[in-house]
Image (spheres, rainbow, N blue to C red):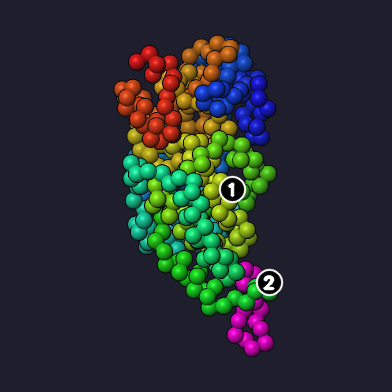
């Protein structure tokens, strides 16, 4: 049995082991009767509520009323809520600095949300590690200028001739300010930006839980295609230029890349609950939930309740069995083996070898 990673799920019902075929996996520590609650995951970290659903889906509990606009809207932060209670909880989760951050982001995005918000073509090749490094290195010079300009807001004072601001001994010149303005004129992808903001705020508000994300399996090539990668590098510059100063030290290439590499194969779709998940609202990363591997014939059924996931035994499970969920949506579970394999390869990057697929 492996050493349990920080933040991994722990229960007397199961153990975590390494496997030769699918990394870490969860195995029953004893017989588990059908319908037993095996785990409840409420550790949402990174998340994106797609902008096109922001008026219809509660920003806190993700409730959905068949496409009707929710009555409680907070236009300053760009989210709607199903109740005042959810609105207040959302503000508590984000904190004062978080509310300020979402307000600034919404002000920038509003009116420009369709510039770069189309879904990416998932048929295009993923950038390789060398291309990813080159893309991030390509914005290093501009980001350094922006960082000096922003730092000037924190420590600025005027030199004796009154011509330049100075930031920690570095003059804030027209070049620095132009780099900042250039970033703000670049196209915006609001969903990529939301993803980055959610991760930054989570790390800011809960630094003690950072190991939970670091412990997740890594995808070294997390970007769908070249345009997706560009959207992230532009969002990095956008956020450097606008986020509140207390967050500035967290807006780093390292952090944004970690968010992407850990989210890529560990996220769960946020879908409607009453129609077999027909509506896809966004996605999120619940670290403890990510230890359950996939099977096209799962023995664990997952159900979302607001911001939490519950995992119950779908049948009687014997001691030693791997506990598996399915990564497929309701309709996808009914597809042929070939179509299931295609979806799993495309979305999660693996070839399924579960019992159902092997028997087909």
- Look at the image and give the residue range highlighted in magenta: 150-166
* Residue 335 image point, x, y percent: 31, 24
Which label sits in the foreground, 2 or 1? 2
Front position in the image: 300 or 84: 300
Q: Is residue 267 magenta?
A: no
Residue at image position (54%, 73%) is 176
Q: Is residue 185 left or right of residue 97?
A: left
Q: Secondary structure at mark 2?
A: loop
Q: Is residue 331 left or right of residue 232?
A: left
Tag 2 and tag 1, C-beta contact below 8 Å = no
* Residue 110 image point, x, y percent: 40, 61
* Residue 140 image point, x, y percent: 54, 61
Q: Of the numbered discs in the image, which one, if any, rests on residue 202?
A: 1
Q: Quadrant of the N terminus?
A: top right
Q: Secondary structure at mark 1?
A: helix
Residue 354 seen in this snapshot: yes
- Look at the picture and state if 156 lies above or below 221: below
Dot 2 corresponds to which residue? 168
Distance from disc 2 to disc 1, alpha carbons, whole Å, reads 28 Å
* Residue 16 image point, x, y percent: 61, 24
């Amino acid at each position: 049995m492996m050493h349990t990673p920080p933040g991994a799920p722990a229960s007397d019902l199961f153990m975590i082991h390494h496997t030769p075929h699918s990394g870490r996996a969860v195995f029953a520590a004893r017989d588990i009767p059908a319908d037993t609650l095996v785990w409840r995951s409420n550790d949402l970290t990174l998340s994106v509520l797609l902008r096109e659903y922001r008026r219809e889906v509660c920003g806190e509990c993700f409730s959905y009323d068949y496409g009707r606009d929710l009555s409680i809207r907070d236009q300053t932060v760009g989210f709607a809520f199903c109740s005042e209670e959810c609105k207040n909880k959302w503000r508590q989760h984000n904190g004062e600095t978080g509310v300020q951050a979402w307000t600034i982001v919404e002000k920038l995005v509003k009116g420009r949300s369709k510039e770069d918000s189309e879904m990416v073509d998932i048929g295009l090749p993923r950038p390789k590690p060398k291309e990813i490094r080159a893309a991030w290195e390509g914005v290093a010079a501009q980001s350094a200028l922006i960082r000096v300009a922003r730092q000037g807001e924190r420590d600025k004072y005027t030199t004796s001739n009154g011509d330049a601001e100075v930031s920690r001994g570095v003059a804030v010149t027209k070049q620095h300010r132009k780099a900042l303005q250039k970033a703000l004129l670049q196209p915006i992808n609001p969903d990529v930006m939301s993803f980055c903001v959610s991760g930054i705020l989570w790390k800011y508000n809960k630094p003690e839980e950072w190991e939970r994300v670091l412990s997740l399996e890594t995808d070294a090539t997390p970007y769908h295609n070249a345009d997706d990668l560009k959207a992230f590098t532009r969002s990095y510059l956008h956020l450097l230029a606008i986020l509140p100063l207390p967050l500035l030290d967290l807006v780093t290439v390292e952090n944004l890349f970690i968010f992407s590499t850990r989210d890529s194969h560990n996220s769960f779709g946020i879908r409607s609950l009453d129609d077999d998940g027909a509506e896809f609202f966004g996605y999120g990363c619940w670290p403890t939930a990510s230890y359950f591997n996939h099977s096209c014939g799962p023995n664990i059924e997952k159900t979302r309740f607001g911001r939490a996931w519950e995992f119950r035994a779908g049948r009687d499970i014997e001691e030693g069995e791997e506990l598996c969920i399915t990564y497929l949506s309701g309709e996808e579970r009914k597809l042929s083996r070939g179509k299931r394999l295609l979806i799993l390869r495309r979305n999660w990057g693996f070839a399924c070898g579960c019992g159902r697929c092997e028997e087909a």
